[in-house]
Amino acid sequence: MTVAFQAGTPAVSLTDRALATLKRHVSGINASVITQHALRSAKKQCGSDDVPTDVLLAELSTASAMFLQPSVRMQVTSELLALMGDQDAKVARYVTVPIRAEGDLKVARMACRDVCLELGVNGFLAQKILTAVSEVARNIAKYAGQGVVRFTADQARRVIVVVAEDSGPGISNIDQIYAGLYHSKTGMGRGILGVKKLADDFDLVTGPTGTTVTLTFSGV
């Protein structure tokens, strides 16, 4: 998944800029809470202090969710991109949702609704995206144990991209599933085929170290 950020922007510098930007929308205390939480989460995710700007921006979006309305969060994201010197960026990652248990499905659905609301997506298209997100998040919780669902809006292509990643054991019988020859009691095979039909573009990469599903929805 490609995110148009200026290469080489130090994470600490971005944190300072994010703090100043957030202070225009929330109190100084809340702005500090958001930026520090986002930086800690980004470092933990990357396993080092060297945090890519796209990861930090994703964590800033997630951390700000409880303080900002969706439309304001979209504005803040645009302001952060501008501060990084990428005024013409056409891609912005909005939300990253960790999936560790069934209870996180609700969070993923709420995040999906937020992204759709930010972009003015409603009706049948919004329902398609929400249904697909619910299914891929459920698969992570049930079969992999943990993973993430990421939402990206590509304004240039007018699409929403949903990426579901996990570090589970992979899907060993994916060819049978694609061929419609496998139907488990849990409905896993039908779920994957259903998600594939919902998305305008579908890509699945699976192996013993995990599975990544990328869904693209057009007409945004």
Image (tube, grey):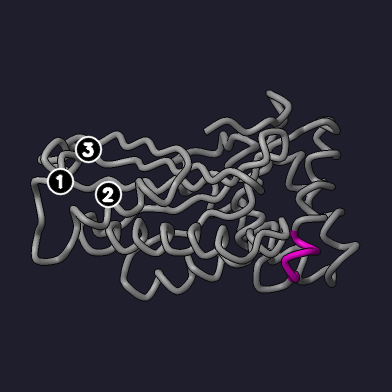
Q: Which residue is mark 1?
A: 180
Q: Are marks 3 and 1 in contact (CB under 8 Å)?
A: no
Q: Position of residue 5 (x, y in %)?
A: 70, 31
Q: Which disc is residue 209 wearing? A: 3
Instruction: Tell me which residue sits at (66%, 59%) in the image.
Output: 121
Above/below status of 166 relative to 99: above
Q: Position of residue 147 (x, y in %)?
A: 35, 53
Is 62 positioned to the left or the right of 71 in the image? left
Q: Is residue 176 magenta?
A: no
Say what secondary structure mark 1 lies in.
loop
Q: Which residue is mark 2?
A: 193
Instruction: Tell me which residue sits at (66%, 56%) in the image.
Output: 61
Q: Are marks 1 and 2 in contact (CB under 8 Å)?
A: yes
3 or 2: mark nearer the eye? 2
> Which amino acid does the dot numbered 1 rest on?
Gly
Q: In whole angstroms, how far apart are the C-alphas of marks 3 and 1?
A: 24 Å
Residue 56 in sight from this viewpoint: no
Above/below status of 88 relative to 159: above
Q: In whole angstroms, how far apart are the C-alphas of marks 3 and 2?
A: 22 Å
Start-end of magenta stretch: 68-73
> Which amino acid does the dot numbered 3 rest on?
Thr
Above/below status of 83 relative to 21: above
